[in-house]
Amino acid sequence: MTTLELAQRCGQSVAMLQNILVNVGEKVGSEFDPLGIDIAELIAMEVGVNVKRLHSYEGSIVLPRAPVVTVMGHVDHGKTSLLDALRQTSVAAKEAGGITQHLGAFVVTMPSGASITFLDTPGHAAFSAMRARGAAVTDIVVLVVAADDGVMPQTLEAVSHAKSADVPIVVAINKIDKPASDPERVKVQLASEGLMLEEMGGDVQVVEVSAVTKTGLDRLEEALLLQAELMDLKARVDGAAQAYVVEARLDRGRGPLVTALVKAGTLVVGQHVAVGAEWGKIRAIRDTIGKMTNNATPGMPVEIEGLKGLPMAGDDITVVDNEERARMLSAGRKKKMEKDRLRKMNEEKVVGTELSEETDSVTERVELAIIVKGDVQGTVQAVTDSLKSLNSPQVFVNVIHVGVGPICQSDLDLAQATGACIVGFNVRTPPHSVTLAAAQANIKIKVHRVIYHLLEDIGNFIVEKAPGTYETEVAGEAQVLNIFELKGRSKSKGDDVKIAGCRVMDGQVMRSSTMRLLRSGEVVFEGCCVSLKRETQDVETVQKGNECGLVLRDCFDFQIGDVIQCLHQVNKKPKFISSESGAVRIEC
C-alpha cells in the first residue's frame, strides 16, 4: 500500500503520515512509494485506526498439513479423559479437582500414521474466552457429550462458538459404558438444538465412544480424518510464519514461555517477532514432548522462549525484519492497549455510577480492589473476566493488577497502597515471610487451585463487603383487647394517658421500634412507643401469646380490635448465586 492510499483509508493528510514516518526513523520519499506492512501498522496505530493483517498464498509452496482439532463440551463430560485414551497418557489425574483449567495443545500420531493436533479446552463457565479462542484457531471441533448427562449449558455454548467461527463439528458421545447412558436421547437433544446429524440426513458425524474402555476410538479417528480430507487442508510452508499464542506462562529459569500454534509459513530460531504488545528474539523452539527443534511448520504446536514479556493468550505472532522494528511495533501496540484500557475503566465506572443512582435504597457503592496472580496468561484472563462478572450495584470489583507467577513482596506493597485483596490461582502457596507480612498489614491473600472454590470464596467475600439495603419489616403484631385511661393526673405526672391492653398474636413487640396502628387494614397512626409493660413491670420485648399494655406517643384514638404492628429496619445483604452450569452472579 502506498502512503497516499493509506492516507485515504485513514482519513488523514499525506503530510501528517509523512511526519509520523520521520518520527519513527523511516526515510520519506514520494507519496506513491509503497510502505512495508509493519510501517503501515505503526502509522495506523498512531492515528488511532485498527488494522488487521491479511496474507495471500500467491507464489508460495502450499503443502497438506495436519488438522487442528479442538475438544469442547460441558465440564466433567470426559474431554481430557478422551484425549488421554487417544494419547495413552494421564493428564486428568494431574488436573486440580479433575477439571481442566488450561488450554493444552499436543500432537497425537494415530495408528494409521496420520497426525492430528489436539487442543483441549476447559468446560467450566468461567473459561468462555478460552473456548472461543480454541474455536477460532481450529479446523474441526469435537463436541464431547456425556451419554448419561445429555446436552448442558456449556455444550450449547461450544456449539455457538463453533458456528460463529464457521468450523465443522464432529460429535463424540462419551461414557457409553455407564449403566445410565442413553445415546439416543443425546442425539434427539442435539437435533432439537439445530445440529443436523448424519443419521437424520445432515452432515454432522456422530461417534459413540468410551474413554474408560477405549471403545469407538478408531471410529472417532476415522471420522476426524474423513472430515479433514473433505476440507483439503493446506498451508504455505515457505516465507515468514503466521502463528497464534495458545497459552503463555512464566518459568523461573527460562523466563516467558509461549505455547504457539503455527498457521502458515515456518517459524525459525533466531527470528525477531512482535507478539501482541511484547517482542523478542526466538532463543529456542521446543515441541510438545519438550525436544528442541530449529523450526516449526504449519499445524505444529510448539513452545517458544526468548520474549521480553508475557503476551496475552490469543495474540498473533508476527515475524519482523530486525530488533528495532519489533521494538517499535511493541511500543505502538502497548500505547494503544493502555489507551483502550483507560477508556474501558472510565466506561465501567460511569455504568457503575448509573446503576447505583437507579437503585435508590443503596446507601453507597463500595469498591473492592483485587490483584490477580495466576500460573498462565489464559487462566489469569479467565479469572479476571469472572471476577468482573461479580460487579453489582453495591460492590464495584476493580481488578487493579494482573500478573503471571507466584505472589511476591511487590504484590503486597501494591495491595497495601491500594487496600486490595490478593487472589492467587494455581500458584504455589506464598513463602512464610510474605504470609507474615500480609497478616501484619491486614492484607487478605486467597489462593485456590479449582475455579469453583475461587469464585465461591470471592463471591462470599463480596457479600461480606457489601453495605446492603435497609428495608422495613414487620417484627410482630398485637391486637387491642381493651383500652385503659389514666385521667386527671397531676402536672408532675404529665397529661392524661390512653393505654392499649393487647395480646401479641405474631412475632414479638419491642419498645425501641416504630409502631403502626391499623384499623380494618388501613394505617391510622405511625409513631414511637413511650411505654411497654407486662403486668406491672417495664419490659423491652413481649413475645407471641403474651399480654401487655403499651402507650404510643401522641396517639389517643385506640379502638378494641385494632392491630398494632411493630416495625424494624433489616439490612438485606446481596446473595451470591452459582448456577448448575457454573455461571456466577451477585443478586441484590
Image (spheres, rainbow, N blue to C red):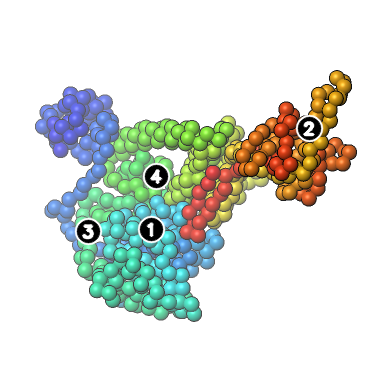
Does any portion of residue 540 appear in the rendered image?
A: no
Label whose residue precedes the other's in the sequence (1 or 3)? 1
Give x and y (percent) for residue 129: 40, 51
Secondary-structure class at tag 1: helix
Number of marks present in the image shown? 4
Instruction: Quadrant for the C terminus, please.
Output: top right
Residue at horizontal 20%, vertical 65%? 232
Q: Tell me whether circle 1 and circle 3 mark residues in contact (CB < 8 Å).
A: no
- Check residue 235 in the rendering and tell me which mark sits there, or answer none: 3
Q: What's the CA distance linking mark 2 and mark 1?
A: 68 Å
Q: Which residue is mark 2?
A: 498
Determine whether the residue tagged by mark 4 lies in a helix, strand or loop. Answer: loop
Q: Between label 4 and label 2, give the one nearer the viewer.
A: 2
Give the spatial CA distance, label 2 vs label 3.
Answer: 95 Å
Please report whichever mark, 4 or 2, sits nearer to the chain's N-terminal start. Answer: 4
At label 2, the amino acid type is Lys
Mark 1 vs mark 3, foreground winner is 1
Which amino acid, mark 4? Pro
Neighbourhood count class around disc 4 (C-alpha, 10 Å): few under 14, some 14–19, many 20 upward: many
Which numbered circle lies on residue 157? Answer: 1
Gap between marks 3 and 4, in whole Å?
25 Å
The three-letter code of the residue at mark 1 reads Glu
